[in-house]
Amino acid sequence: MYQSVCASCQGTNGFPTTEDSWSRNNLAGNCNNATFKYDLADIRAAFRTNTPELNVPGISTGCAPFEVFFENFSQGGLEFVWDFGDGTQIVQTEKQDVTHVFDSIGTYRVVLTVIDANTCSVQDSAVAFINATEGNFEVGDDPTICIGEQAQLSASGGVQYVWVPPFGLSDNTSPTPTVSPTQTTTYQLTITDAAGCRYTDSVTVEVIGEIGAAFTSAQTVFCADDNVVTFANLTTNGLDFTWDFGDGTSSTEENPIHEYEQDSVYTVTLTVENEGCEAVYSERVEVEQLLVPTIFTPNGDAYNQTLEIKTTEPVDLAVFDRWGKMKYSAEDYQNTWEAQNLPDGVYYLTVTLPTEEICKGVIHISRD
């Protein structure tokens, strides 16, 4: 605003004017026409949001805790009041940029008020809204696979995925890569969403190693007519066991003992499981009761020439005459006795089993 007055009359310079403010025409006899310039200082609040790295000007949405850099572009002002909408205020006496962290999720109204009481307008304000958000991330469960199989990992909620280690992964930047490790492996995952929120988690793929299904069997021989077989489970890396004894019966014991009703050769099958992985092993098991004949004919015709004891276990044999005198004995008898130098007749015998049980009987030697 300008005001015209008479100034510097009669050759004096007692009324100085604002620089460059004068009249081009002197309409007074001995005075100048002076003009006062009233400078009503301009005041304007302005700011811009950015990242602390100054690489995303105008940013308004980010992941809590969300750090925002506020660039102060205000004009004029002697006092600058920042209100971040979360109960925090900063008062400055100089125009400065500020950084603020929004710790909690929410939408915040940020106001910069610029104040100068010497101006006509006194103060001016600028407003921006900041949205501090959180990610909505999901990561799949830890899978279990059998060795040689594949597992599919899964994650969601992001625009960028990074799995480490990348080895064995079909794509370590995919939200759903497939993987086939040879041993239990933990994969670290970092997810980033569109707002810059980051989430870190891990997925462990448990690999069930090879199951070595195996067993041995041994028949326990008794003097009575019992066919009892003991099974020794030699399986490695197994948890659950199912036995099929081949006679229509089964068991889930780890080391079962089974009694068969009849002499025969049975196919016994062991099925082993571990966390869904399976292995099967089968073996033929011969079951035979102890059978000691009551007569044999060592007459040289190659038939029934020796005393043949049928058993699945080694036994000791002793033969006595009717007066109790031992005529023959053998440990681990091999069915080779031909009654050499013994006359025909009835003899007594004992068969000692591995269990120390002694079975007694008679044997008739006849060469006719």
Image (cartoon, rainbow, N blue to C red):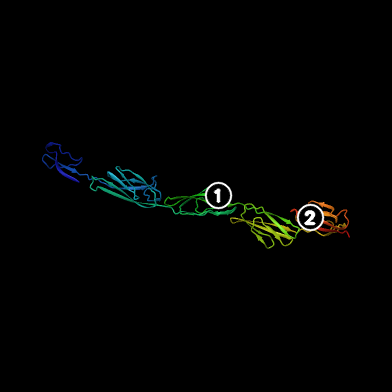
Specify the amino acid type for callout 1: Thr
* Farthest-out residue, top: 12
Can residue 35 be seen? yes
* Farthest-out residue, bottom: 248
Expressed as whole percent of the image width and height from the top left, the position of residue 299 reads: 88, 57
* Count of numbered marks: 2
Disc 1, SS: strand
Compared across the picture, whether 247 is left or right of 30 comes to right
**Nearer the observer, 296 or 187:** 296
Q: Nearer the viewer, mark 1 or mark 2?
A: 2
Expressed as whole percent of the image width and height from the top left, the position of residue 304 reads: 84, 58
Could you say which quadrant of the image residue 360 lies in?
Answer: bottom right
Q: Residue at x 19, y 45 (%)?
A: 2
The residue carrying pointer 1 sits among few (fewer than 14), some (14 to 19) or many (20 or more) residues within 10 Å by Cα, namely: some
Q: Quadrant of the C terminus?
A: bottom right
Marks 1 and 2, how far apart at CA: 59 Å
Disc 2, SS: strand
Q: Can you identify the residue that label 2 sits on?
A: 351
Q: Can you identify the residue that label 1 sits on?
A: 185
Compared across the picture, whether 85 is left or right of 286 comes to left
Expressed as whole percent of the image width and height from the top left, the position of residue 37 reads: 20, 43
Q: Residue at x 29, y 49 (%)?
A: 125
Reply above or below: 275 against 70.
below
Tell whether label 2 touches label 1 (CB within 8 Å).
no
Reply above or below: 263 against 198.
below
Compared across the picture, whether 300 is left or right of 208 comes to right
Q: Which tag, 1 or 2, sits closer to the chain's start?
A: 1
**Nearer the observer, 300 or 353:** 353
* Farthest-out residue, left: 29
Expressed as whole percent of the image width and height from the top left, the position of residue 305 reads: 85, 57
Specify the amino acid type for callout 2: Val
Compared across the picture, whether 310 is left or right of 45 comes to right
